[in-house]
Amino acid sequence: MINNVIILIMISLVLVDCKSDYLDKNKRDNSKQVEIIDKNKKDALKQVETIDKNKKDALKQVETIDKNKKDDSKQVETIFGFNEIDVSLFQRESIIIRRLKEGLNDEEKIALSFLEKVITERRVDDIEYVITHPERIFDNFLLYLDAVKLREVLTPIIQTLTAQVEAATALSKYDGARKNEFKQELNKKEVLYLEMLKSGVNLDSFDIMYTFLKNNSNAYQFILLKTMIESS
């Protein structure tokens, strides 16, 4: 009888120990879960902080862009003398273009008018893939150029048009047997010059248009023709 009691007591103690171990294990598991949850919370907080930082950085960039726009606007106002605060962008651009044109001499104005026709007017002889730009693109090109680059573009045109007029003048004074031949040659060179300019502005890149126009003059073609006429 006593032995049975002892056995029961021992079994009870074993069960208590097992239960205690089970509870301890659950506590440890729960503790790990709590640690995981805490870690996830910390990671989530870090992500939120990162998002907030990115938002702040984005806002700073927007503020910087706005500031740069205002600074650019002030520079334009300083250069071109705008006084009206409420002048629209289109009006400002129109004023800039007008003042660019007003700053040109007579030769430059003629060359600019010639260039405008080349860029914006389609000729009957133009091949299909040649672009004829609208007036707005021409205005944007002028805004891109500014006063210095505009003169660089107009200089080769002035040289070519001047040589063309001199060749035409020499032809008008010539009464020899080759008059019709020289007249046809003059017309041919005029057409070739127009086609060359058309091909050079047949682009959507103002950088390339500018580089092409400032580096291409056909004056030598007309000078050569003038020399041939005068020596015949």
Image (cartoon, rainbow, N blue to C red):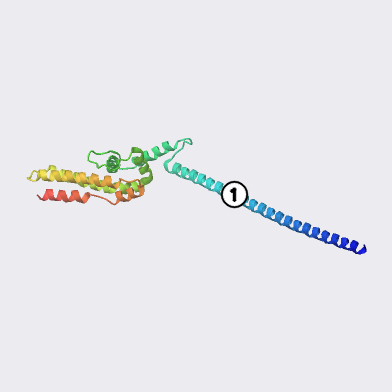
Q: Nearer the viewer, residue 221 or 226?
A: 221
Q: Is residue 86 left or right of residue 17?
A: left
Would you identify the image quadrant in which residue 82 lies? top left
Name the foreground residue: 78 vs 22: 22
Residue at the limit of the structure toward the front, as seen here:
1
User: For the view shown, which residue lies furthest in the left direction?
Assistant: 177
Q: Quadrant of the N terminus?
A: bottom right
The answer to whether residue 58 is left or right of residue 95 is: right
Residue 220 vs 78, above or below: the answer is below
Q: Position of residue 122 (x, y in %)?
A: 27, 38
Q: In which image quadrant can residue 100 be found?
A: top left
Where is residue 123? Give x, y as percent. 24, 39
Residue at 45 percent of width and 43 percent of height: 78
Which type of secondary structure does the marked residue at label 1 adopt? Answer: helix
Q: Nearer the viewer, residue 17 or 178?
A: 17
Q: Label 1 crowding class (10 Å Cα cut-off): few <14, some 14-19, many 20+?
A: few
Residue 50 located left or right of residue 179? right
Who's the residue at 85% across and 61% down the image? Answer: 11
Residue closer to the observer: 15 or 157: 15
- Would residue 69 appear left or right of 106 to someone viewing this image? right
* Position in image of residue 24 (x %, y %): 78, 58
**Residue type (three-letter) at the residue carrying disc 1:** Ile
Q: Which residue is mark 1?
A: 51
Q: Position of residue 94 (x, y in %)?
A: 39, 37
- Locate residue 177: give its quadrant: top left
